[in-house]
Amino acid sequence: MKILFVCLGNICRSPLAKAIMVDKIRKKNLTAEVDSAGFEPFHRGDPADRRSVEVAARHGIDLDHHVARLFTARDFDRFDRIYVMDSINYSDVMGMARSGEDEARVDYILNLVDPGKDLHVPDPWYGGREGFENVFKMLDTACERLAEEIDTKNKSQ
Ligand code: 4NP
């Protein structure tokens, strides 16, 4: 399975989601590919936000080599699932969908935990360290569900 995580800046939430998921894929020996992307050109080419790098490191996860990139319509061809953090990202991604097939790949990441509720992973950009810890917990819970799903799928193949 190929999974893309999307946020606004591609420096805080979605790179952290990717790093968490990569860690789970490695530890559980799963077959899956992960990437992340955003919509805010200002941060293109930047590393992950220092606060995301730090919260990842506190949990033993490496987020040192991220390079922020923009979402493109081609991502609909490259990924099976596209998980967004909030309604802004949802509108941004859906606005670039070319078909119902593209749209069907898109969902809120927290629907992995609370299906159909469209809950948001809050933008931690203006918050402090606590905000990032909170975001880490939300993303870790969602990624754990996704890892369990991939594990079940891998075993049935
Ligand atoms: P992210 O956080 O979407 O989780 O990467 C943000 C980072 C930067 C900005 C917005 C959100 N910004 O507007 O610069």
Image: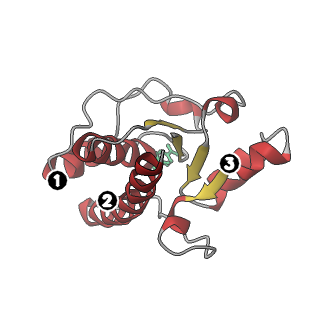
Q: Residue 15, located in which quarter of the rendered image?
A: top left
Name above or below for residue 34 compared with residue 147: above
**Residue at disc 1, secondary structure:** loop
Of label 3 and label 2, which has the lower sequence position? Answer: 3
Q: Is mark 2 within 8 Å of ligand 1?
A: no
Residue that badge 1 annotates: 59
Horizontal and vertical percent position of residue 106:
66, 51
Residue at the extreme front of the image, as rendered: 156
Name the residue type under label 3: Arg
Residue shown at 35% from the left, 65% from the top: 141
Residue shown at 51% from the left, 40% from the top: 1
Calculate the distance from the C-alpha at mark 3 to the C-alpha at mark 1.
30 Å
**Residue at disc 2, secondary structure:** helix
Residue at the extreme top of the image, as rendered: 45
Q: Nearer the viewer, mark 3 or mark 2?
A: 3
123 sits to left or right of 140? right
Name the residue type under label 2: Phe
**Residue at disc 3, secondary structure:** loop
Residue that badge 3 annotates: 105
Q: Residues within 10 Å of mark 1 (few under 14, many from 20)?
A: few
Q: Nearer the viewer, mark 3 or mark 1?
A: 3
50 sits to left or right of 151? left
| Frontmost residue, 157 versus 68 | 157
Q: Residues within 10 Å of mark 3 (few under 14, many from 20)?
A: some
Residue that badge 2 annotates: 136
| Frontmost residue, 56 versus 114 | 114
Calculate the distance from the C-alpha at mark 2 to the C-alpha at mark 1.
9 Å
> Can residue 131 be spotted in the picture?
yes
